[in-house]
Image (cartoon, rainbow, N blue to C red):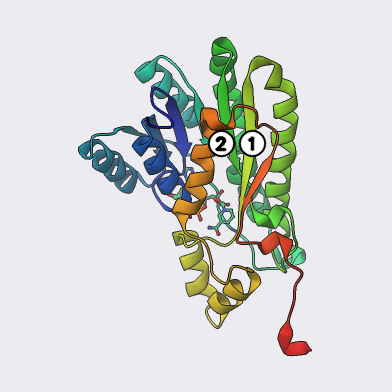
């Protein structure tokens, strides 16, 4: 029996990386998945590939920085399936690698818009349907950066810490209506976001990332997708308000530098 059969799911930022893996895993587990993204060709191709493999998937253009787009994505899921069981607020961007005083107001506002306001808007659009059904699972993408410090990522960490705080708040508020709200904090994951950073920063960055994770490697998108499938499924029916760390031990580790001993 598939873990999400009969469920209707929306995933933002579903064309690439972690969102791609989550949308694919949820479709394989029997959900009808509505993929939202701004990378239209890639997103539409993924939905077509999933359908060709016998799953149910539709692509809808959705820039999470635009409330009307998020409303349209949620509306498409409800129109297509008559319900909304799962919302994954995954889309996010990484602007950082600079001290606070080097960041412009425009960069700050863009991060807040795409990483944080999008979560508010997604929940705002999804909750009326979930409240009507008296059931639902919302999964917000946070980050290990919301738990620990890393030079140059203050604003990004701020958005992810806020996502976790909002997750707890909504879990309390909507738990009595059988709506569960959880977040996931990935460590460093092998996605286009990080490929771009590796290209931009270069040097020994990959080795440094590997060393920071006690499991001795960075993670793969499908490993985060497993956590999302679990949180969306009935196996997690008594789990709400948590942040599930899928981080190879990154946030458990002190910044241990053997070379300095
Ligand atoms: N990769 C990591 O190491 C890592 C670690 C912790 C948290 N995260 C978080 O996981 C999420 C996904 O990250 P990723 O590494 O897969 O990123 P990615 O850049 O590899 O993929 C992000 C996807 O989101 C889409 N996207 C970007 N801006 C968008 C917008 N305005 N509206 C809709 N879609 C948009 C992109 O087109 C792309 O398909 C983000 O919230 C990120 O902050 C990633």
In the orientation shown, which residue stands out farthest toward the front? 1
Q: Mark 2 against mark 1, which lies toward the viewer?
A: 2
**Above or below, 258 relative to 127:** below
Q: Residues within 10 Å of mark 1 (few under 14, many from 20)?
A: many
Q: Residue 167 appears at what percent x and percent y?
A: 69, 35
Check disc 2 and report the residue beneath it: 231
Question: Residue 256 has which mark?
Answer: none
Q: Where residue 194 sits in the image (x, y, percent)? A: 51, 64
Given residues 131 and 121, the one toward you in this image is 131
In the image, what residue occupies the spot 75% across and 25% down?
A: 172
Identify the element where label 2 is drawn: helix
Q: Is residue 198 above or below residue 132?
A: below
User: Visible in this render: residue 67?
Assistant: no
What is the quadrant of the C terminus in the image?
bottom right
> Is label 2 in contact with label 1 (beta carbons under 8 Å)?
yes
Dot 1: element? strand
Q: Does 175 sit left or right of 51 as displayed?
A: right
- Residue at 58%, 32% in the rendered image: 236
Residue that protrudes farthest toward the right in the picture: 261
Q: Tell me the quarter of the image containing the N terminus.
A: top left
In the orientation shown, which residue stands out farthest toward the left?
52
Residue denoted by label 1: 182
Residue 106: x %, y % from top left:
64, 53
Asked where in the image residue 105 lies, by quadrant, the reply is: bottom right
Mark 2 residue crowding within 10 angstroms, few (<14) / some (14–19) / many (20+): many
């Amino acid at each position: 029996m598939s873990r999400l059969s009969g469920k209707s799911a929306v995933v933002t930022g579903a064309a690439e990386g972690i969102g791609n893996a989550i949308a694919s895993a949820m479709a394989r587990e029997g959900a009808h998945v509505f993929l939202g993204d701004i990378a239209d060709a890639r997103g539409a191709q993924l939905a077509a590939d999933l359908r060709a493999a016998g799953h149910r998937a539709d692509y809808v253009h959705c820039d999470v920085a635009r409330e009307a787009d998020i409303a349209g994505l949620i509306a498409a899921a409800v129109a297509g399936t008559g319900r909304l069981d799962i919302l994954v607020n995954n889309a996010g961007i990484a602007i950082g690698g600079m001290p606070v005083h080097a960041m412009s107001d425009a960069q700050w506002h863009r991060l807040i818009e795409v990483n944080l306001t999008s979560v508010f808007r997604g929940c705002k659009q999804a909750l009326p349907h979930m409240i009507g059904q008296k059931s639902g699972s919302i999964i917000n993408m946070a980050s290990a950066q919301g738990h620990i410090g890393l030079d140059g990522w203050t604003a990004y960490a701020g958005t992810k810490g806020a996502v976790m705080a909002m997750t707890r708040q909504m879990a309390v508020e909507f738990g009595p209506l059988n709506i569960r709200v959880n977040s996931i904090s990935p460590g460093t994951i092998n996605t286009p976001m990080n490929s771009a950073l590796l290209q931009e920063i270069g040097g020994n960055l990959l080795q440094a990332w590997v060393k920071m994770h006690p499991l001795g490697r960075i993670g793969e998108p499908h490993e985060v997708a497993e956590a999302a499938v679990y949180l969306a499924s009935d196996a997690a029916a008594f789990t709400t308000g948590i942040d599930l760390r899928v981080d190879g031990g990154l946030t458990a580790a002190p910044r241990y530098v053997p070379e300095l001993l």
